Structures are given as structure tokens and as C-alpha cells.
Image: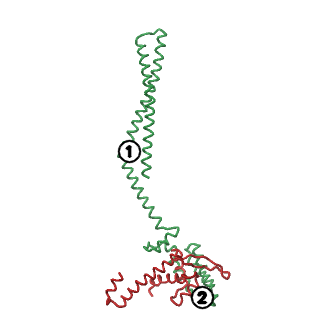
Amino acid sequence: MDAQMKKGLLEVCVLSAIRDEESYGYKIISELEPYIKISESTLYPILRRLEMSEAVTTHSVEHNGRLRKYFKITDRGRAKISEFIEDMEEFERISNFITRGGKNSRRRKEVT
Amino acid sequence: MTYESWEKELVERLDILPKNEKEEIISYYREIYGDKLDAGESESKIVSTFGEPALCAAKILLESSIARKNAAPEVNEETKIEENSTPVSTKTSAKPKKRSAKSWAIAITGWLFFATLILIPFASAIISVIAALGASTFTLAALSVGGVILALGAPLGYLIGYTTPGVLATFGSGLVAAGVCAILTIPFYYLTKYITVSSYKLAKYCFRRDK
């Protein structure tokens, strides 16, 4: 997959992994594994970016004598997921056009 | 490679980052390392999935606060938010400074122009009026004192026996001068004061409006 595309996609994937329940680094990676491969060093900047843009909030909890950082989604984060879903609907129409070529040129007008 | 040496190498490569950011990264990897151990993975397997410390460091540095500060301004909502949330924002602090310097330059040039055209002649006119009035006040005061002396001196001369019509005339003119000056000194004094104070107020008003 295109790196730029994957970057944006991963951000929404991480948000989705914590949408219903707050989560932590290892759990996020494990949950995403069946769908999209994400390494630890890729996840860290994403989490940081999400935290900076106030899409998530964090708090640390002690677990087995270690600190575990939990990530919780905010309304801003939820809005990002909704935005992505809307974008995807548009993307699907464009994707249809790309796959079919110019045969259905009318569809393009609907998109724009 | 042990986790410890892996972490050490990573930290070395993150040296340019601020201390708190480095600590955050260390605790992030330690947390995942611990969770993976709990899940039954071996140390060497975990370290190998983490990958080369240099590569991890590169990925982190690309997204770090330093990279964001140095990056060319992107017109992107997310970066805007991130820049606003960082306390030291080069983009937001530099622009208003430039703008204010420019506006100051314009203001000063404008004022210099305004001053040479209007303020200086205006001020000199005010100063001349004040000086003239002040001088008149002083002259009148001196004249009144002189008048009093003349008025007192004339009868004294008469007592001594020095009586001429001139002495009487001097006595009369002395009285008149003292009287007129007594009447005029006070309004002249207040007029001088009023003009001085109001021109000061005008100048103050002009400068305040500029700011």
C-alpha cells in the first residue's frame, strides 16, 4: 500500500481501536494485527500526533508494577472517524470510476 | 541483542530530543516490551520485531517536536492544531512581530512627516505666544511695582519741599500704571497658564491617539 495512504489510514485505525474502550500500546497493535500491520515504532508517532491534536487523552495506570499508558478517544477523535467514513464513501465512487475507466463518465459528475 | 542494549542504542540516537520526550519514548517501549514478555514472547524475538534502533529513532525523529518546528508550514488542519498546542511556536510568534515592526515604521514616518508639517510651526507659535504673554505679565508686574514706588516717592519729595508740577504728574502716572497693571497682571498670568496647560493636553491627546 502507498505509504502516504497507509499513514492516514493507520491513524483512523488506531482511533477505531479505542473508539469503544480505552486501550494501551500493545493491545492496540494486537487488535489491529488481523487488519493492518503496524509496528511499535510506527504506532508511537501516531499516538503522539493524536494526543497533540487532542483526538485522544491519556492517563497512566500501574499494572504489574509497571506503568501502562491508556489512550481514550475524545469528541474530536470521533469526529475524525466520521470524517474518514464520509471520505471513504466519496473514495469508493472515485474508485469505481478508476476501475471502470471512462465508461461511466456520468458518475464522475455525481462525485464532484 | 538484549532489550537493555537495544534501548540504550535508541536513546543515544534520540539525543537531540528534549528530555521529557525521550523519557516518554523509553516508557512507551518499556511498556510494550513488558506486555510482550507477559504474552510469552522471548526477549530476542521482541527486540527483533522492534527492529533496528536507528530505524526506530529515525521514525520517531521525523514526527518529533523538533521535526515539526523545522518543517515548512503545511496548510493542514492537524499541523495547525499541533503547532498551536506547542508552547514554542515559531510560526505564530514570528508573524505578529514582523507586522508590529512594520506598523511602527509607518507610524514613526507618519509622525515625523506630520510633525515637520504641522507640529513644529504649531508648537513654535504656541511657544511664542506663551513667551510674549509671560514677558508681558512680567513687564506689567514690574511696571506696577515701579508705579507704586513712583506713587510713594512723589509725596515723599513733596514733603521734602521739592514741589514741581512734574512731581504731581509722576505721582499720577505712577498711580495709573500701578492700577492698570494690578488689573492686567492676574488675567495675563492665568491666560499664560491656560495656554501652556492646554497645549500640553493637546500634545498628550495627539500621542495617545496614535497608540
Against B103, is B55 above or below? below
Comparing labels 2 and 1, the label whose residue is closer to the camera = 1
Within the image, what quadrant is residue A90 found in? Answer: bottom left
Query: Label 2 is placed on what type of residue?
Result: Ile
Tell me the subunit letter for badge 2: B
Instruction: Identify the secondary structure beneath mark 2.
Output: helix
Residue at the spot 44% in from the left edge and 43% down from the top edge: B201
Pinpoint residue B47: horizontal percent, then vertical percent.
59, 87
Residue B206 vertical placement versus B24 (above, below): above
Residue that badge 2 annotates: B46
* Picture disc at residue B85: none
Label 1 sits on what residue type?
Leu
Q: Is residue B53 left or right of residue B173?
A: right
Q: Which residue is mark 1?
A: B119
Can residue B54 be seen here? no
Tag 1 subunit? B
Q: Which chain is red?
A: A
**In front here: B25 or B53?**
B25
Measured from the top left, where is residue B123 in percent x and y? 39, 41
Name the spot of residue B138 as percent of width and height, x first. 44, 29
Please, what secondary structure does the residue beneath circle 1 have?
A: helix
CA distance for labels 2 and 1 = 80 Å
| The image quarter in which residue A20 lies | bottom right
What residue is rendered at 43% in x and 81% in y? Answer: A86
Q: In the image, residue B61 lies at what x, y percent?
A: 52, 77
How many numbered circles does the render carry? 2
Question: Up-down: is B37 above or below B170?
Answer: below
Chain letter tied to green: B
